[in-house]
Amino acid sequence: MLVLSLHILLLAGFSLRLLLRDDLAAATRLSWFMVILVLPFFGSLIYFLFGEANLGYSTRDRIAEVAHSVHGHAAELFGTGASALHALPERFRPAFLYSQSINGFPPVAGNAAELMPDAATARQRLIADIDAAQNHVHVLYYIWLDDETGTNTARALIRAAQRGVTCRAMADGLGSRHFVRSPLWQQMRDAGVQVAVALPIGNPLATVLKSRLDLRNHRKITIIDGEITYCGSQNCADPEFRVKAKYAPWVDIMLRAKGPVVAQNQLLFAGDWIAHCGGTLADFPLTATPQDPGFVAQIMGDGPTERRLATPHLFAALMNAAQRRVIISTPYFVPNSIVLESLCAAAFRGVSVTMIFPRVNDSWIVAGASQSSYHRLLEAGVTIWEYDGGLLHAKTLTIDDEISFIGSSNLDLRSFDLNYESNILLHDYAITRAIAQRQADYIDASQPVTLADVKCWPAHKRMWNNAIATMGPVL
């Protein structure tokens, strides 16, 4: 009798909570209803732990307050972005305007960038830039390992701090949990590097009781002297990625950029730093030099304290602007209806849409949910390739050889709703063609997936993929 009463109370309590939440999509609400109805005790526990994007009231309010200050400072520093906006082709302006509405960073002209040829070169150039720094170095990484890459980066920061450069280093409390407890982290602190942990875990039980353990800072930000920034998908780790070595190498993409977007990335970093460590925006130089000639770009930072569905809506705006060709690579593809339908709609109206995924994914859940959408995409005319050369971790989007969007965001529900992300949206023919060529290199190392292939999948595989996808809003 006691068990039955508890069963009824759990169903009633969590059902009422779900019905009172205006922020949930109908599919997500239905998925949670199903989980709690079928597995009331386990489902209620899972909802308590992971059902809401809750950082805890004090953390949420502090981050929101800092974000408001950053938005206001961006408006003072960059203005409305009207002149840069009018330098763009008209069909792309709505997407840049929408991106501006997310965190207040308008499109800015006068930017320049180099596409790094590979992960090793990107890290060599980054360390060389740190060694040449004269004023400050700011870094933020989701995953920081004590491998060769992680150690060399830490040593470069130590050298910079010892010669008087202001160095601030932040790492995510979960993704870099071993590194922030390592002797190297302490050595950085002892050398004068200011270190901080983003969204620290501390006591896991206490963290779970007051917030969500899986709300993470997934950003990858590097700023040197306010003049150079690195944007892309590469964590502070070797491509061999020893914590998941059987999926290696991790294949990433990085841009080394100059111009006003450096100041925007600086503001994004500053917001995270101030929220966790205090200080003011006056502590962060915002003097990036415009490049001549340069292109129009803007930084887009998203996260659970920003507007919900901001990234999917931006993605849809970009798809609506495409006229000839869209190429996308992403390691984790768990789309919501906005993303999936915008891809299909673009293909149906004659745009060549190509998707590149890793053949072997380090997440079996993501693999199943991703493959569940293959039939719908292929039927719409989307081309799908699966990369064989390791874990394709590069998050890239190119449109019509004009627009590029790269950074830390995956096309999955975690990046949409749960992670803090950093990306760059830019309009430039040369950089976009270079990224498109890199995408072509990925395709050369891939195998095609056809509609006939998917139709030949056994029933148990299709059922499994669809079951995982059904639970996608919960996962």
Image (spheres, helix red, strand yellow):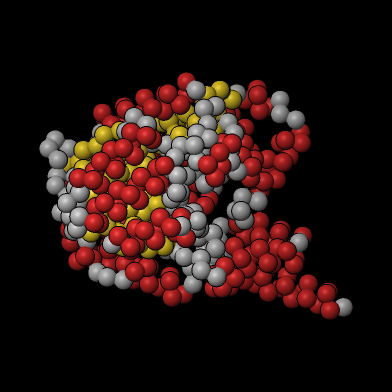
Q: Along the horizontal axis of the image, is 208 left or right of 141?
A: right
**Residue 48 image position (x, y, % from top left):** 63, 68
Depth check: 67 or 444 in front? 444
- Left or right of residue 151, residue 361 in this image: right
The residue nearer to you, when weighing 361 against 310, is: 361
Residue under the image location 52 percent in, 24 percent down: 446
Q: Which image quadrant is residue 426 in? A: top left
Location of residue 231 by image quarter: top left
Q: Is residue 188 visible?
A: yes
Residue at point 47% right, 65% down? 200
Number of marks present in the image shown: 0
Name, please, the residue furthest toward the right: 1
Position of the N terminus, as image quadrant, is bottom right
Q: Is residue 150 above or below residue 19?
A: above
**What x and y, as percent, mark residue 263?**
22, 53
Residue 325 in view here: no
Query: Is residue 185 toward the left or the right of residue 12 in the image?
Result: left
Q: Who is closer to the viewer here, 277 or 148?
A: 148
Q: Taking 11 as reference, is 117 above or below it?
A: above
* Residue 53 in picture, x, y percent from top left: 52, 64
Q: Residue furthest top?
A: 444
Identify the residue at image location x=34%, y=69%. 277
